[in-house]
Image (cartoon, rainbow, N blue to C red):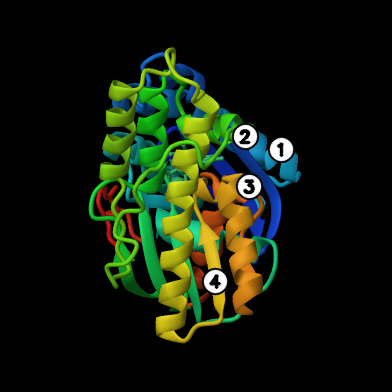
Amino acid sequence: MLLLAIETSCDETAAAVVRNGREVLANVISSQVKVHAEYGGVVPEIASRKHLEAIPLVIGEALASAAVSLDEIEGIAVTQGPGLAGALLVGVSVAKAIAFARRLPLIGINHIEGHLAAIFLERPVAFPFLALAVSGGHTHLYRVEGFGRYRPLGQTLDDAAGEAFDKVAKLLGLPYPGGIEIDRLAATGNELAVALPRPLLHDGSCNFSFSGLKTAVLTYLQKHPLSEGAVTINDLCASFQRAVCDVLVAKTFQAAEADGIERVVVAGGVACNSVLRRTMTEMARQRGVELLIPSPLLCSDNAAMIAVPADYYLEQGLRGDFSLDALASWPL
Ligand code: KG4
Ligand code: ZN
């Protein structure tokens, strides 16, 4: 099917045209990051308003760059949740309006399911696989048996990994979103400079906890102001990033081993992180596990990833109706 997919769960207004859930004809992303950076984080009310302004343009641009007219579109896919309610509502309303006006089948997709499926836009992947979804709002491990068949193995008990990156960046006076800034500064820092905890590393569960790590950075800064010591902001970024990555990598491979899975997918915005990608790759090689991480553009929020499960469900005959509503919280 030729699908138009729409994603507005947070601060990216995105639309994509995707054929058969695999071939990306257009993947347009309009980021609101500059607007929210002024406030040090996403302001939900502003996000909704910016989505409203951008969505017609973004959809128009996606159709134009795919050289496809709305008449050729065979179905509409939209992120239904989880995310910011008001932001989701913009995408859901536009999707319903187009589906109604054009009499097209409509399907609402879970944002996390989209992240996990993004890899299929780049290569085929056999089921089952273990998936780590690691983003601003989520840090979850799943055993994936097929589309719609996710067994949760563990998750964060407090902050998501991306949230920890963003909060630590804020403590360090870095601009929003902090993950990418920490990644950049850490490249020239010493990751052994500051000893930070590896929360829950040896607790035997597949759960994570990152809020204590953030507090450890704060405590360190209070005792050792960066202006007074030999440790630089780059060193602190590198030490923090290493602590997060050590836990993410160790827990992912422990879970894969415990579940007897030899294929691992890493997805979500934090999967853009250079040290996470490198460490995951090294560990997979050592363990003889197949590792799949989408290219960075497909790790961060985009609409093409939403079209992957959407195509599968629509081909199965599933349809959303016009009662479809945004779901701020929606466990996969
Ligand atoms: O998946 P995503 O684009 O949006 C959500 O669904 O949350 O993920 C955004 C998160 C933010 O917390 C951002 O700081 C983080 O991903 N992120 C990174 C990097 N690039 C984005 N974190 C660490 N290193 C990066 N290079
Ligand atoms: Zn996301």
Q: Which residue is mark 1?
A: 64
Q: Which residue is mark 2?
A: 60
Q: CA distance from mark 4 to mark 3?
A: 17 Å
How many neighbours does mark 4 have within 10 angstroms: few (below 14), some (14-19), or many (20 or more)? many
- Which tag, 1 or 4, sits closer to the chain's start? 1
| Disc 1 secondary structure class | helix
Vertical comparison of 3 with 93: above or below: below
How many neighbours does mark 2 have within 10 angstroms: few (below 14), some (14-19), or many (20 or more)? some
Residue 105 appearing in the image: no
| Disc 4 secondary structure class | strand
Residue 41 % position (x, y) = 37, 25
Disc nearest the viewer among 3 and 2: 3
Asked if labels 1 and 2 touch by Cβ distance under 8 angstroms, the answer is: yes
Asked if labels 2 and 3 touch by Cβ distance under 8 angstroms, the answer is: no
Residue 225 % position (x, y) = 37, 18
The reply to whether the residue tagged 3 has its Cβ within 8 angstroms of ligand 1 is yes
Image quarter of residue 189? top right
How many numbered marks have been drawn onto this rendered protein structure? 4
Residue type highlighted by circle 1: Ala
How many neighbours does mark 1 have within 10 angstroms: few (below 14), some (14-19), or many (20 or more)? some
Tell me the quadrant of the picture where the N terminus can be found. bottom right
Q: Nearer the viewer, residue 292 or 19?
A: 292
- Which tag, 1 or 3, sits closer to the chain's start? 1
Residue 234 % position (x, y) = 54, 28
